[in-house]
Image: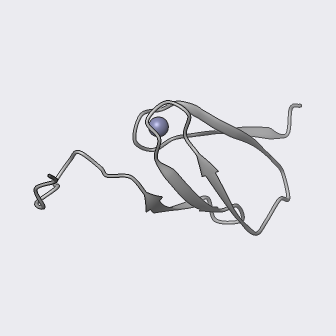
Amino acid sequence: MKNARRIECPACGHRLMDKKEGAFGAVQVKCMKSKHVWEIELSKLSFKLIHGKLYRDDKESVS
Ligand SMILES: [Zn+2]
């Protein structure tokens, strides 16, 4: 597993999955801790928030 990279939830740091070297494509994963749903582009390790809210700089009030 030396080529596997641990991917953590950007919001809370909970482990989402392990990425193997060379993996690519977009996956959607749900954080079991903070309930955020992320779409992760594996080749770039870019995160896009699909569901859930971030706490920092959140100008919208959530009712
Ligand atoms: Zn999380």
Picture coordinates of residue 30, whole percent (x, y) = 58, 46
Q: Please give the name of the residue rendered at 61% of the width and 60% of the height, measured from the top-left corner.
A: 40
Along the line of sight, the residue nearer the viewer: 3 or 14: 14
Q: Is residue 14 left or right of residue 49?
A: right
Q: Residue furthest front?
A: 63
Along the line of sight, the residue nearer the viewer: 19 or 16: 16
Q: Please give the name of the residue rendered at 10% of the width and 56% of the height, measured from the top-left corner.
A: 61
Q: Quadrant of the N terminus?
A: top right
Q: Is residue 16 above or below residue 43?
A: above
Q: Please give the name of the residue rendered at 53% of the width and 30% of the height, measured from the top-left corner.
A: 14
Which color scheme is applied? one colour
Along the line of sight, the residue nearer the viewer: 62 or 48: 62
Q: Is residue 35 left or right of residue 57?
A: right
Q: Residue furthest right?
A: 1
Q: Is residue 17 left or right of residue 32?
A: right
Along the line of sight, the residue nearer the viewer: 45 or 62: 62
Picture coordinates of residue 10, whole percent (x, y) = 45, 44
Q: Quadrant of residue 34?
A: top left
Picture mark count:
0
Q: Is residue 60 above or below residue 20?
A: below
Q: Is residue 53 above or below residue 35?
A: below
Picture coordinates of residue 19, whole percent (x, y) = 77, 46
Picture coordinates of residue 54, whole percent (x, y) = 29, 49
Q: Residue furthest bottom?
A: 25
